[in-house]
Image (tube, grey):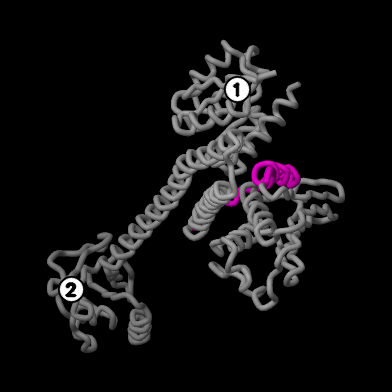
Amino acid sequence: MKSDNHIKVNALLNGIKEPVLLIDPQAQIILKANKPARMVFGNDETEKLAGQSLQTLYDGTIFSFTESIIINGARNGRKIKLDFRLSTLKINDQEVVLAIGREIEKQQTLKEKLNLLKQEKAVQEMKANFISMTSHEFRTPLTAISSSVDLLETKLKMDELMNAFYQHNITKISTELFNLTNMLDEILTLSKIVSDNYAVIKSEVNAEEVVNYLREQYFSERKDGRTLQVKSTGTPRDIYVDKNQLSKILTNLISNAFKFSTKGDPSIKLNYQEKKLVVKVCDTGIGIPAKDLPNLFSSFYRASNADNIEGTGLGLVIVKTFVECNNGTISVDSEKDKGTTFTLGFKYRH
Amino acid sequence: MTHTILLIEDNLGISENMKSLLELHEYDVLTANNGEEGANIARQQRPDLVISDIYMPEVNGYELLEMFSEHEEMRDIPVIMLSAHHEMDDVSLAMSKGAAGYVTKPFMFKNLHATIKRVLNARH
């Protein structure tokens, strides 16, 4: 019976990955040590630790009710500290103390890792805040510049001094100013996506209201006289999406529709179907070559016929990310030199 | 009939340019460089329209909208917000507080002018 127990205790101790000691609290003697314990105390010879006084390892006395003790050891030639948690057991009516050790430095490393992660998160947040602040701050001088350009243009026209040279250069400055603003927005949005620093806040959204706002804000009074055609069919219902993100999705797709076409008004068609709202953004522009379609939503990828058209190659990455965040769908149909149609699908709440 | 527009903008460069642009388009222009000063001028001079920045010292644009809706003598003066903040949340907040329009910075004067005309037409 005693030998059975002996075998069981050995098997039990050797099954534990952490260093374990069995100690006789009366005699302060080590009764058993498993292999990990023998390794950290520099003695892998079987049972050699057993029978030794606890004093050889620990400068103190343990009691059956003590909670834990710290013992120095070594692992792979490196000095370590072990925190042994003590608990009292009875084996063959003899009270013994089971001591299970954990490397303290290992725990500290985890703590340190956690601290590092926290610091990294703070840096990411700081970075996103910095980019957000900067992108707003940039808008102030950009507004001063663009209003100066507007003022010059208006004054030259009123004084009948405008000529083709002035007009060409003024148009160039304003176009580039707005390209710069769009780039700032895209970088800001993408930096939020990359640092996972954006929350999807869904609510009931009237998509038509968003489209009409965007049309007035960004797609009216264009120099080329083109406008955005808005059509709606079916019974209007609110969709359940993040309003800011929906606005970014639509702004990007509508901007592209204007950018990649020169003739004809781009259109946006809202079709309220039974289960979802289907939005089609269409243009009659240069189209996307079939070979470019598979890479269309990759960062910095630009279609092979887009070389002469301004863009960062980030717009559709943002579009796709936000469509996915809102459980929406997106697909594209395009024919070179005929035009492109992006089709979005967004569900209603119920 | 010449309309009077009160322009509330804390950036001097932008304010100067906008004043000139509006005057070239035959508007009379009053200016203030913060919300509090703007509210005082609005109360005393009752312009036809206010164009206001949102993030300003003292009284900001949202607080200004609240002041306009609380005071009877200013309640019917439409306010167009002009801001570098362009998220739909900012737009929705301003509209829910009674803004008549929202134009984001940087803007093209053509766009701002279209909004001005729409708001003034709706008033008459």
Instruction: Give the amino acid type for the residue marked by disc 1 in the picture.
Output: Ile
Q: Would you say the residues marked 1 and 2 are in contact, meaning their CB atoms lie under 8 Å apart?
A: no
The reply to whether the magenta stretch includes residue A216 is yes
Question: Which chain hosts label 2?
Answer: A
Decide: is B100 above or below A318.
Answer: above
Residue B45 in the image: x percent, y percent?
Answer: 58, 12
Residue A72 percent across, percent down from the top left:
18, 70
Relative to A325, residue B34 above or below: above
Horizontal side of residue A84 vs B124, given as left or right: left
* Residue A203 versus residue A289 in the image, above or below: above
The part of the image, by quadrant, that contains residue A252 is bottom right
Residue A310 is marked as none
Residue range of the region highlighted in magenta in the rendering:
A196-222
Residue A199: x, y in percent?
55, 51
> B95 or A269: nearer the eye?
A269
Do the residues at pointers 1 and 2 share their chain?
A: no
- Report the residue marked by disc 2: A79
**Residue B60 percent across, percent down from the top left:** 50, 27
Q: Which residue is mark 1?
A: B5
Q: What's under tag 2, amino acid-wise? A: Lys
Q: Residue at x 74, y 50 (%)?
A: A228
Up/down of B43 relative to A24, above or below: above
User: Count the marks: how many?
Assistant: 2
Q: Inspect the magenta stretch and tell me whether residue B88 lies in it.
A: no
Identify the residue at horizontal 83%, vertical 49% (top origin). Answer: A232
